[in-house]
Image: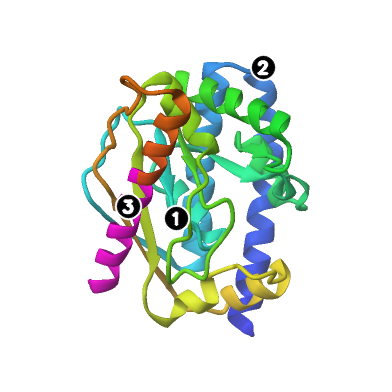
Amino acid sequence: MLLKTYRTLLLITLNFMLLFPGMLLNLFFLPAGRSRAKMQAVMTMLWSRAMCSILGIRVAKGGRRTKSVFFTVCNHASYVDVLAMGSLKPTAFLSNHEVKGWPLIGWLARLGGTVFVNRNSKRASLRSMLEIERKIDYGIRVVIFPEGTTSDGRSVKAFKSTFFNIPARHNMHVRPVSIRYAGEVVDKVAWHGGKKIGPHFWTLAGLRKINVAVLYGNPIPPQSVGVSTVEARKRLRDLAHESIVQGFEALKRN
């Protein structure tokens, strides 16, 4: 109980302390453009590292990273995935639009350049794609969770192909990343099945440490030659899913 209370108060204090500087920096970098987007990605990395430190999240990296691949996809079990991936390098994320309305965290996510999407609206998805394309043009890594929801952390769900339209149209490489939580802690870290965020975080805050393994797969080359964009995005989806499942199973064995 003492650990949970201490961490919760520390996180609330940290996030309120970051809120005002984040607002000032976003105002300083008006209008929105390359400099502002890069500043937001760096802010997200620093915030993620601070959050990981407070919550005892330890990230072990594997695989060869490539600086020139900006469209990254990985499996998704929890909001902790965002902290783990965000702590590794300046990053922008695609998130469900519900997060935008979360007190404090939603505000910080907006200040950090998160792209929000309402997956039930085709028009909203198209707007989100354009925003992601702009960030990639600025040289910012964007992380997508193509399952479209979270899993139980013990398997990888099927991928949706919608946002693979971006690398399919622009002949981009795709970087697949597998993420897995060590031991039985996965049952407490995974946020799925309609779990309430408050009770889930309260349990999470009581974990002494959270070991998470992140495995970078080999970049998937463009698949657009001689096929339609629809077919290319489906190929990219299938290849990314296959790579991430293979990486996930490899992490299970280690």
> Residue 67: image x %, image y %?
29, 31
Q: Separation of disc 1 and disc 3 at Cα?
A: 11 Å
Residue lying furthest bottom: 1
User: In the rendered view, would you say 65 is above or below 62?
Assistant: above
Could you say which disc has been placed on residue 21 in the image? none
Q: Earlier in the sequence, mark 2 or mark 3?
A: 2
The kind of residue on which mark 2 rests is: Leu
Q: Residue at x 31, y 27 (%)?
A: 222
The answer to which image quadrant residue 25 occupies is: top right
The residue where tag 3 is placed is 242
Closer mark to the observer between disc 1 and disc 3: 3
Instruction: Tell which circle, 1 or 2, labels the residue nearer the N-terminal end.
Output: 2
Q: Which residue is mark 2?
A: 30
* Residue 198 placement (x, y as % from top left): 72, 70
Residue at mark 2 to residue at mark 3: CA–CA distance: 41 Å
Residue 182 seen in the current view: yes
Residue 251: x and y in percent read 28, 66
Residue 138 in view: no
As rendered, which of 117 and 47 lies closer to the eye?
Answer: 117
Residue range in magenta is 239-254
Q: Quadrant of residue 112?
A: top right
Mark 3 residue type:
Glu
* In the depicted structure, whether residue 10 falls above or below residue 204: above
* Helix, strand or loop under label 2: loop
Q: Report the magenta stretch's main SS.
A: helix
Inspect the image, locate mark 1, and give the three-letter code of the amino acid beneath it: Asn
Residue that badge 1 annotates: 75
Residue in front for this viewpoint, 219 or 182: 219
In which quadrant is the C terminus drawn? bottom left
